[in-house]
Amino acid sequence: MGSTSFGIPEHRFGSNGEKMPVLGFGTTVFPPVGAEATKMAILQLIKLGYRHFDTAAKYGSEQPLGEAIQEALSIGLIQSRDELFITTKLWCGDAHGDLVVPALKRSLQNLKLEYLDLFLIHWPVSCKPGTYEFPIKEENFLPMDFNSIWAAMEERQRLNLTKSIGVSNFSCKKLTDILAIANIPPAVNQVEMNPMWQQKKLREFCRANGIFLTAYSPLGANGTFWGSDRVLECEVLKEIAKAKGKTAAQTGISEMDI
Ligand SMILES: NC(=O)c1ccc[n+]([C@@H]2O[C@H](COP(=O)([O-])OP(=O)(O)OC[C@H]3O[C@@H](n4cnc5c(N)ncnc54)[C@H](OP(=O)(O)O)[C@@H]3O)[C@@H](O)[C@H]2O)c1
């Protein structure tokens, strides 16, 4: 494990040993905040030493993140884009073989970047081409054609538009389906994981198959659309935190055995 210049440790993952700062900042919140607030928050975080940012086509935060990166470069907070680790995700309405390329190009344009560090399939479902609503209406769900989508993801990695490709919200069963057809296996699976939902079976599966499991909502989220406040309200976690002289949030992240 190495570390960024500000001391956030880095994991190595994937067959090429890419580096990923262990702490990333997610750029979606509910209720949403404006683009300017998102950009200013990201600039502050870069100042504080964050180098890993997580966005998605669906979040509406690609553009403010792109603007923050440009500004961070222009005012010298970072010397080069290579100092950052940027993840974005393919939305379900673009999860069709022929739409992956245009979707990735749009994301790169929004982010004002030439390449991504990580490009993920956001969910293991497709919905009607071009639909962006969330929650997805039942009548708009479509089965995912893993073959054509994963082939397009692999092609993007070969063309160096992204250093790594991966998935999000994939179960062991869905990962098995992808692994059966993949020439380049998914480097990462990003899922909801925290002390109250430890994903033991999935962690073992990913470890055994060389897939790096990353956690979203490690503190549990606010439960509006996903997650719950059970993590930070957990009495056992509070007790451990008190004994260690830390906050429940610090303890929740540092005690996860991942
Ligand atoms: N791949 C996916 O499908 C997916 C789905 C959901 C989320 N994500 C990613 O995960 C990111 C994080 O998600 P999240 O916000 O739900 O989870 P989180 O980082 O676990 O935060 C959950 C809540 O914890 C509170 N919190 C944060 N830092 C704290 C601290 N130091 N002390 C006390 N409380 C603290 C915040 O509450 P307050 O708001 O009250 O401050 C926040 O709403 C998203 O932005 C997104 O990038 C991915």
Image (cartoon, helix red, strand yellow):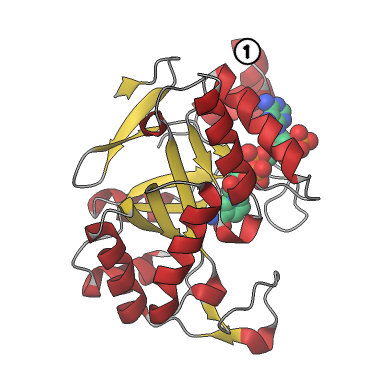
**Image coords of residue 59 (percent x, y):** 64, 55
Residue in view at x 23 percent, y 73 percent: 180
Of 130 and 149, the residue lying toward us: 130
Q: Is residue 16 above or below residue 223?
A: above
**Image coords of residue 253 (percent x, y):** 54, 30
**Image coords of residue 240 (percent x, y):** 61, 21
**Quarter occupied by the N terminus:** top left
**Image coords of residue 40 (percent x, y):** 70, 31
Q: Residues within 10 Å of mark 1 (few under 14, many from 20)?
A: few
| Furthest-top residue in this view | 245
Question: Regarding mark 1 in the picture, which secondary structure is present there?
Answer: helix
Mark 1 sits near ligand 1, with its Cβ under 8 Å away: no
| Total count of labels | 1
Q: Is residue 139 above or below residue 205?
A: below
Q: Ligand 1 is in which quadrant of the figure?
A: top right
Residue at image mark 1: 243
Query: Does the rendering let one see residue 196?
Result: no
Of 106 and 224, the residue lying toward us: 106
Q: Is residue 242 above or below residue 206?
A: above
Residue in view at x 23 percent, y 69 percent: 182
- Asked which quadrant contains residue 37, the reply is top right
